[in-house]
Image: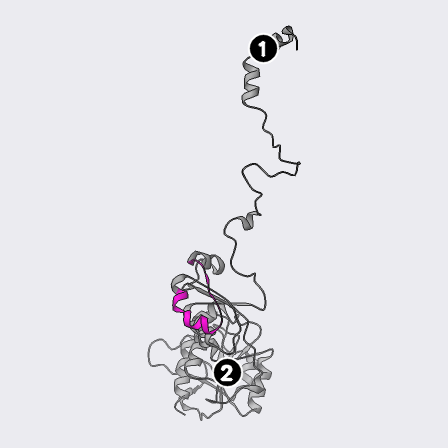
Amino acid sequence: MSRMDSSKTHQSRGPTAKRSETKPPRSKPWEGQGESRPHRPKSAPASQEKNPSPFRQSSPDVILLHGFHAVREALRSDQRTCLALYATEAAAEKLAPDSKAAGLAPHIVTAEDLSRRLGSQTVHQGVLLEARPLEPLDITEIPTRSGVVLVLDQITDPHNVGAIVRTAAAFDVDAIVTTERHAPALGGVLAKAASGGLEHVQIVPVVNLARALETLGRLNYLRVGLDSAAEADFTQLPLQRPIALVLGGEGTGLRRLTREKCDFLARLDMPGKIKSLNVSNACAVVLTLIGRI
């Protein structure tokens, strides 16, 4: 380059030229050239980049059990297929003998992980079990130990059904007959409320409850429907076993066809000012009375 050219070049470096050199246009030279962004490896999708979920995806053939007693009894059950156990360090330590016997190594997670999976309001007690649903029982295959069966007519509240299952397990009830529709799922909140009872009571789902009651009648069950408006007092009935105690849904009670298929409709006479009980409490009272026959 000539001296004149060099001088021109030097003179052209004014303030504007300097700003251009010190602050070049923002460019991304790595884009479109097959190169990685400098000092930053190619990142995973946003959903996987931070705190990827340790849990398996939801599936119709996988149920979630939470709560210490529900999970412990499931781990101990010969009828339950357990897939994966997630627990905080403290909960895993408490469940160590049962998880080892079940052949599961717990995945250690935080309480926050469990709350994100189950919902912030869920009382999970630091443990979650992924498992297969229990195999349903046919109504003609109900075993006879106590000679007592519960029939639930569209009881939809999982807390109530869970409490009934827990009570049924305590009284060694042979089975619980329930409708396939208008009934809560046999896991989650229901299993937590049942406090492990779900592993000890046979569940019989039916499509048509009226036909199921007819079948129980042919199997010589005495079918007694509990109805607060009934004329007969439950304690005055000629009770005998086997007996099927029929309980109605919250608010609606027993449906017409259900009532028609019962041998007796009866009420519980309460001595206090409140004459009606929650369905799960009424179930416990009646099972106590049945225990006397």
Judging from the image, what secondary structure is the residue with disc 1 in?
A: helix
Residue type for callout 2: Ala
> Is 94 a magenta residue?
yes
Q: Is residue 20 above or below residue 5?
A: below
Residue 231: x %, y % from top left: 45, 85
> Is 268 a magenta residue?
no
Residue 80: x %, y % from top left: 52, 75
Of 28 and 235, nearer the camera is 28
- Judging by the rendered image, the residue that carries numbered circle 1 is 10
The part of the image, by quadrant, that contains residue 98 is bottom left
Measured in 3D between alpha carbons, the distance from the residue under mark 2 to the one under mark 1, in whole angstroms, is 97 Å
Residue most toward the top? 4
- Judging by the rendered image, the residue that carries numbered circle 2 is 175
Range covered by the magenta-colored residues:
91-110
Q: In this view, does 272 lie to the left or right of 199?
A: left
**Which comes sooner in the sequence, label 2 or label 1?**
1
Residue visible at 51% across and 49% down? 50
Residue visible at 44% across and 80% down? 169
